[in-house]
Amino acid sequence: MLRVLSIFIFILASTSVFAAESPTRFISDDVFTYIHGGPGTEFRIIGSVEAGQPITLLDNTEGDFTQIIDHKGREGWVLASLVTDQPTFRERLPEMEAQLKQANDQLNQITNNTGNVEESLKLANDKVAELQAALSEAVKERDQTELKVQQAADNKRYQMWQQGGLIGGIGALIGIVLVYLPRPQHRKKNRWM
């Protein structure tokens, strides 16, 4: 019994060590993706991961799928093409805002420290304009990504309605056909043959 317990503890400790060493990756910004129970779409869906959520990438890839652990601790398989090592716009936007704030702080410092205020102001304004352009580009990309996610959700809803209508129509057709099928004739019990 002690031997079995020590083997079980060793297995638990080794899996937690391997999970701790795995690199953190992210689901790309395109859309949400389903987590499957195995490496393929024929396996059961155990959940979904929203675009931009951090995941832990496990060193197991089969075909187009790779094994992950999501931010909720669920272990499963997703399409490898949807996993990226780049942080998402959701995380980069605060960094850009921080850089913009830092540029504004540098502008104030340069204005106070130098005698040539116009030249320093021009440099700082160029930096602020550059950061604002990068920020507006990130906001534009985020809006496009949100639009793609909304379109994907609308398409999924439309497909579900379409399938429901098809199932309802087939059921109604079967009901109508069953009503008009000839019924078997029952013999009278009082007849001799």
Image (cartoon, rainbow, N blue to C red):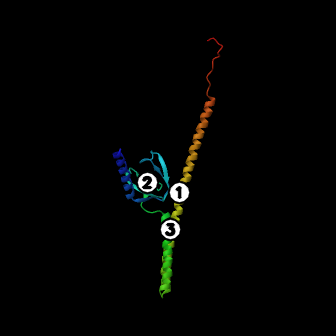
The answer to whether the residues at label 3 and label 2 have Cβ atoms under 8 Å apart is: no
Left or right for 17, reference 105? left
Q: Position of residue 179 (x, y in %)?
A: 63, 30
The circle drawn on residue 94 is 3
Nearer the observer: mark 3 or 1; the answer is: 3
* Mark 2 neighbour density, 10 Å: few (under 14) some (14–19) many (20 or more): many
Nearer the observer: mark 2 or 1; the answer is: 2
* Helix, strand or loop status at disc 2: strand
Q: Quadrant of residue 23?
A: bottom left
The answer to whether the residues at label 3 and label 1 have Cβ atoms under 8 Å apart is: no
* Along the line of sight, the residue nearer the viewer: 41 or 168: 41
Q: Position of residue 132 (x, y in %)?
A: 51, 72
- In the picture of the structure, the residue carrying the numbered disc 1 is 149
- In the picture of the structure, the residue carrying the numbered disc 2 is 69
Q: Position of residue 39 (x, y in %)?
A: 41, 48
* Mark 3 neighbour density, 10 Å: few (under 14) some (14–19) many (20 or more): few
Kind of residue at disc 3:
Pro
Q: Which is more N-terminal, label 1 or label 3?
A: 3
Kind of residue at disc 1:
Val
Q: Which is more N-terminal, label 2 or label 3?
A: 2
Identify whether 27 is placed above or below 114: above
* Helix, strand or loop status at disc 3: helix
